Image (cartoon, grey):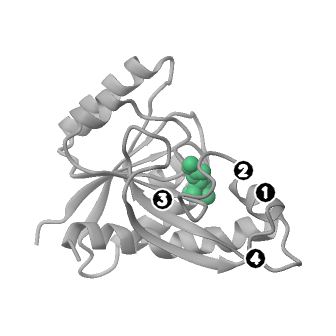
């Protein structure tokens, strides 16, 4: 079986990257993490990639067009089948999405369509929501808006604060991201 080649885009810590790497190392995994791209220099996620001997690049984000052109070259050179955004805090242009003809997916720490953008945990707590959660979705040209692949929720307790909720949601993120990739690759 030929494994699908994934590029993971990050901006920082890389805990979702780490969980995808762990999954990719399992016997019979359908995918391999072939490439890691970060718009930030010297972040923990790049160190995780180095440790796992995965090709990784810091691509300076001087502006969107230059960044995206450099990244597209790397993607084409490495024949990437799927891009996974994992804590990548930049918005990709319509042009980029069109030029990269394979799917691009993203993980977001809320029950989309609720709370697109930043500070999702704070918003859920402020609104006294009963549940929060995480969503993996297809990336389109609108922020956090493409078709949902998988979503899983978690109860918000009265005792929860932003920090505890964030931790609970992150745990779900690590659980659902690889599931979503498999779902996408196998069309079930
Ligand atoms: C994750 O919670 C991810 O859902 C979020 O950033 C964090 C990155 O953590 N992404 C977004 O908010 C994107 N809109 P990680 O670097 O440890 O994977």
Residue 40: image x %, image y %?
56, 34
Q: Please report whichever mark, 4 or 3, sits nearer to the chain's N-terminal start.
A: 3
- Label 3 and label 1: CA atoms lie apart by 24 Å
* Of callouts 2 and 4, the N-terminal one: 2
What is the CA distance from the residue labelled 4 to the residue labelled 3?
25 Å
Residue located at (51% from left, 17% from top):
62
Name the residue tied to disc 2.
119
* Residue that numbered label 1 is attached to: 122
Give the residue at the far left of this rendering. Answer: 1
Residue carrying label 4:
156
Label 4 with label 1: CB-CB less than 8 Å = no
Q: Residue at x 52, y 55 (%)?
A: 48
* Crowding at mark 3 (Cα within 10 Å: few <14, some 14-19, many 20+): many
Residue 181 location, x and y as percent? 33, 67
Neighbourhood count class around disc 1 (C-alpha, 10 Å): few under 14, some 14–19, many 20 upward:
some
Q: Are marks 4 and 3 in contact (CB under 8 Å)?
A: no
Q: Would residue 186 appear left or right of 177 to someone viewing this image? A: left
Mark 2 C-beta closer than 8 Å to ligand 1: no
Crowdedness of circle 4 by 10 Å Cα count: few (<14), some, many (20+)?
A: many
- Find the distance from the CA under tag 4 to the CA under tag 1: 11 Å
Judged from the image, the secondary structure of the residue bearing numbered disc 4 is loop
Can you tell which mark lies on residue 17?
3
């Amino acid at each position: 079986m030929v494994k699908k080649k994934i590029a993971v885009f990050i901006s920082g810590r890389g805990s979702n990257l780490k969980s995808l790497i762990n999954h990719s190392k399992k016997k019979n995994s359908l995918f391999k993490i072939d490439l890691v791209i970060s718009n930030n220099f010297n972040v923990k996620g790049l160190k995780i990639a180095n440790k796992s001997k995965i090709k990784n690049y810091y691509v300076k984000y001087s502006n969107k067009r230059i960044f995206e052109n450099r990244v597209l070259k790397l993607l084409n050179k490495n024949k990437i089948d799927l891009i996974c955004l994992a804590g990548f805090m930049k918005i990709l242009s319509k042009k980029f999405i069109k030029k990269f003809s394979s799917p691009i997916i993203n993980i977001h720490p809320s029950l989309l369509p609720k709370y697109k953008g930043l500070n999702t945990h704070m918003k859920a707590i402020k609104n006294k929501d009963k549940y929060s959660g995480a969503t993996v979705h297809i990336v389109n040209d609108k922020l956090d808006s493409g078709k949902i692949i998988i979503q899983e929720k978690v109860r918000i307790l009265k005792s929860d604060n932003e920090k505890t909720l964030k931790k609970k949601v992150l745990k779900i993120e690590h659980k659902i991201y690889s599931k979503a990739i498999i779902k996408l690759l196998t069309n079930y």
